Amino acid sequence: MRLNLITKLTLATGVILMVTMACFAWLRIGNLERLLLEEAVTSADNLSETIVRTTHYQMLDNDLPRVFQMITEAGSQKGIKRIRMISKEGKIAFSTKRNEIGTLVDKKAAACNMCHTGSAPLLHATSMSRSRIYRDESGATVLGMAKGIYNEPKCSAAACHFHPSSARILGVLDVVVSLDNMNAQLAEYRNKAIIQTIILLGLLTLSLTFFMMKLVTVPLRLLLTHTKKVAAGDLESSVAVQSGDELGELACSFNGMTDNLRQARRELEEWAHNLEAKVEERTRELKQMQAQLVRSEKLASQGELVAGIAHEINNPLTGILVYSSLISSDPKLDPELKPDIETIVRETQRCASIVKGLLDFSRETPPQKKPLALEQVMEEALNLVIHQSLFHDIVIARRYAADLPLVMADHNQMEQVLINLLLNAGQAMTGAGELTITTGVFPGGEALFASIRDSGCGIPEEHLGKIFDPFFTTKDQKGTGLGLSVSYGIIANHGGKIGVESQVGAGTTFTVILPLAGVETEPVES
């Protein structure tokens, strides 16, 4: 059986109080018994003195009957068990118990302790030394008081007395009184003390129990209930602070702990809710990085292959172009063959243009970087293409951010990239649409961006991952598929990035990101 805290405290307090009050009552009863005994001894001694003094003159007159009568009357008082007169030889001269008269008493008896407690008889003794407590023949507790009868000058000079003046003690008056009254008072006092102790102990126990329940048990139960709720996951509950003592501080600490746990759980829930989105975002970033690495490796390997092919094709292609041009200008040429020769020259020039593009793609020319204003380079690129017939029906919207910082870039290479993106946007709109150019500071503040958005046909999603690959084009026979590859390499060498977003039927947006002037960057490996 498990005892609760209030029961344990009540039992412990009750035991301590019981022991303390029992000791206190025992001391009080002992003191009272001593006081009552001293009072009884004093009363017995006073009675003995009174008898001696009242019979003094009768003794001088040797009126023994009168003396014995007075002793008998004194012995008839309530509480007097026996009064006897003993001579110094130990003979009982008179006793209220007639059967004792004329008998001898033992000098070692209690009645003789006044004179015979040592080797020599005592002449004087205190009242406490002359008293003794014992049980009489009936088993009752009695108090005996021995009073010496001294040989005063009046006694030795009296005509009736034969005691010499040298005798100091003539006899002993032994008074025996009952202690029943004292014992009854002690018993009554003891019973009252026990009852009072029990009542007081009960009142103290009830009072302590009440205040302990109010001040200790109730707050602890509230704390226990609160901890059970917290253990069950209820972090919205709190403990009512009922006092400013240690239990109140403990309640405040519990409330603070619950608040911290509630905040931690909310953060964990928010983190758990956002974890999936963060994982998806990180996965997308990893896929983009992986795609960039794959594209860079592909461009590097294709660049080496293209460079070798371009050099091998360039020499015979130059000879074909030279000789076909000479034949075309020869007056001996049959006029019917001249269109065929012009076709050879035109296609040879087209092949030469493709070879030049291949050489530009494979050649990693280090950019000559210097601080540039991005919107200025954009305007110069626009001026070079805006007058072409391709842009006659295209509305151009410029959204340049004000007070943009400078970027570190090669002017010619950046102009080449922007021209290529502008031409691609114009060709995607088939001669009509809206071209939006936007510049600004990239989030993070360490780079600028320039986006070119067209309202053209868009790029299918399955082609978005290939548009920066060499020789990939969506223009049928009109393009070589090298423009975006060359642009990608240039931006990578500048430590920047180029990205694309497109939706079929809604348009395409190319975004170029370049580091600011003063920001150290490493070229992206290609």
Image (spheres, rainbow, N blue to C red):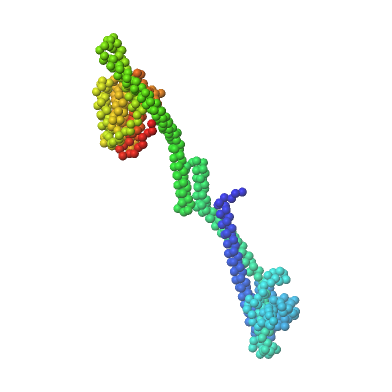
Pick the residue in front: 284 or 350: 350
Q: Is residue 55 visible?
A: no
Where residue 133 appears, x then y in whole percent? 67, 72
Where residue 131 appears, x then y in whole percent? 65, 75
Pick the residue in front: 452 or 158: 452
Q: Is residue 526 above or below residue 351?
A: below
Residue furthest front as drawn: 332
Indicate the quadrant where residue 262 lies.
top left
Drawn side of residue 465 relative to residue 98, left or right: left
Indicate the quadrant where residue 105 lies.
bottom right
Q: Is residue 253 above or below residue 505?
A: below
Indicate the quadrant where residue 331 lies.
top left
Residue at 47 percent across and 47 percent down: it is: 254
Tag count: 0
Look at the image and tell me in which quarter the C terminus lies.
top left
Residue at 34 percent across and 22 percent down: it is: 315
Pick the residue in front: 117 or 354: 354
Pick the residue in front: 435 or 186: 435
Q: Is residue 336 visible?
A: yes
